[in-house]
Image (cartoon, helix red, strand yellow):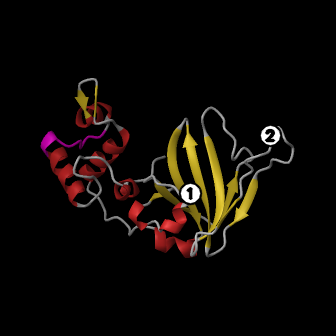
Amino acid sequence: MQRAIYLEPDRIPVQLRRGYSGKKFKAVVVTEMTIPADAGLWSGGTRSTYSAIVLETGQAATVSDNMSAPWDATRKEQRIALKPGFAVVEHSIFCGKDMGLTFYVHPDNAAKLLPAPAEALSEHESIVLNATCSYKSSYNGQDRYDMAKSDSRSMSFPTRAEWDSAKWLLIGKGLLNKAGAVTPKGRNARPPRD
């Protein structure tokens, strides 16, 4: 599967939100995607619905089967070839939590939605960014620095002062907000995980 790219909410045109008022947006750039056979069904508090959408106008049509029974033989996986000017929008609820909208877009349309590429990060900045994405701000009397340090196998793990310096550099680059939480730009700058 292609890597999701996190989008800034203010870059999403109103007509593409389709009534969604949250702030979680992702894009996956593909020429083809598959809608699973169980799309539109609730299972354990989880559900994904899909719509095909015209990018210019926001006109949409539901493409997931929200009405058939799960055992209905007509329920099948759908392969959709994306064409320029169109996208498929997935709205996901995972265990009762709204996970936002994922736009599956053709490469020709991706530039309008996608953020600019992130600049390269130093090793310490990468460590701090990965720890911010991986750990709670504090747990069991330990902060992110302590948790990351105890899990690290790196020989060049930063000192506390180097950690704080890297954190301020990430805030300055817009990869972390002023409270130290990761931003969509920061999620995109994080190196891919295996």
Q: Is residue 92 above or below residue 19?
A: above
The quarter of the picture where residue 160 lies is: top left
- Residue at 71 percent across and 49 percent down: it is 36
> Magenta stretch: residue 118 in it?
no
Kind of residue at badge 2: Ala
- Report whether residue 58 is seen: yes
Residue 183 coordinates in the image, percent (x, y): 34, 54
Quarter of the image with the N terminus in it: bottom right
Residue 2, disc: 1
Most common SS among magenta residues: loop
Q: Which residue is mark 2?
A: 69
Give 160 or 51, whichever is nearer the viewer.
Answer: 51
Kind of residue at badge 1: Gln
The residue segment tinted magenta is: 154-161
Crowding around mark 1 (Cα neighbors within 10 Å: few <14, some 14 to 19, many 20+) is: few
Residue 192 coordinates in the image, percent (x, y): 44, 52
Number of numbered discs overlaid on the protein picture:
2
Q: Is residue 167 above or below residue 147?
A: below
Mark pair 1, 2: CA separation = 30 Å
The quarter of the picture where residue 107 lies is: bottom right
In the rendered structure, which disc, 1 or 2, sits on the residue that comes first in sequence? 1
Q: Residue furthest right?
A: 73
Q: Are marks 1 and 2 in contact (CB under 8 Å)?
A: no
Q: Report helix, strand or loop for mark 1.
A: loop
> Magenta stretch: residue 159 in it?
yes
Residue 57 coordinates in the image, percent (x, y): 58, 74
- Residue at 66 percent across and 38 percent down: it is 42
Residue 60 coordinates in the image, percent (x, y): 65, 65
Crowding around mark 2 (Cα neighbors within 10 Å: few <14, some 14 to 19, many 20+) is: few
Mark 1 vs mark 2, foreground winner is 2
Give 150 or 184, whichever is nearer the viewer.
Answer: 184
